[in-house]
Image: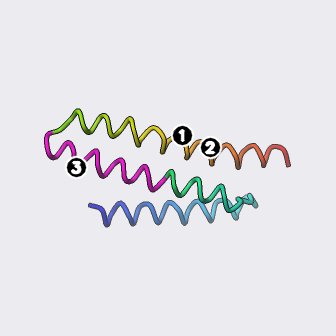
Amino acid sequence: MWFIIGLVAGAALLALVLWLRGRDIKVTWYEWLIGAVGLLLLIFTIQNLVGSFAELEPTAAYMFLLVTGLPSIILLAVAWQLVARRQRAG
């Protein structure tokens, strides 16, 4: 299962890079870093969510979703907004 998730994440990252190059959108190093941390945190959240449900611990799963899932979504949104606002301004 995690091999497939890795393949999908890699294909999505390749598609993102090709899409950004096709539209001539420049992304700074810190935007990549924020996005990568957000993506890794999201994958970590999904792994622990599945593991907690497999161990029949739904309360732990939901708490983990709140504690790490929400910050991962926020980091991804911040990275996206940084790129979008710089493109609108420039």
Residue 53 magenta: yes
Secondary structure at badge 2 equals helix
Q: Amino acid at mark 3?
A: Gly
Q: Amino acid at mark 1?
A: Ile
Q: Amino acid at mark 2?
A: Val
In 3D space, how far apart are the residues under numbered discs 1 and 3 (Cα atoms)? 23 Å
Residue at screen point 29% across, 49% down: 48
Secondary structure at badge 1 equals helix
Other-residue count near label 3 (Cα within 10 Å), few / some / many at <14 / 14–19 / ≥20: some
Tell me if label 1 and label 3 are in contact, CB under 8 Å.
no
Q: Which residue is mark 2?
A: 78
Q: Please tell me which residue lies in front, 9 or 54.
A: 54
Q: Please tell me which residue lies in front, 57 or 54.
A: 57
Give residue 28's mark.
none
Give residue 74's mark.
1
Residue 77 position in % (x across, y down): 58, 42
Image quarter of the N terminus = bottom left
Secondary structure at badge 3 equals helix
Q: Quadrant of residue 56?
A: top left
Residue 73 magenta: no
- Nearer the N terminus, badge 1 or badge 3? 3
Q: Which residue is mark 3?
A: 51
Tell me if label 2 and label 1 are in contact, CB under 8 Å.
yes
The region drawn magenta spans: 39-56
Residue at screen point 74% across, 58% down: 25
Residue 86 position in % (x across, y down): 78, 48
- Residue 11's place in the image compared with 49, above or below, is below
In 3D space, how far apart are the residues under numbered discs 2 and 3 (Cα atoms)? 28 Å
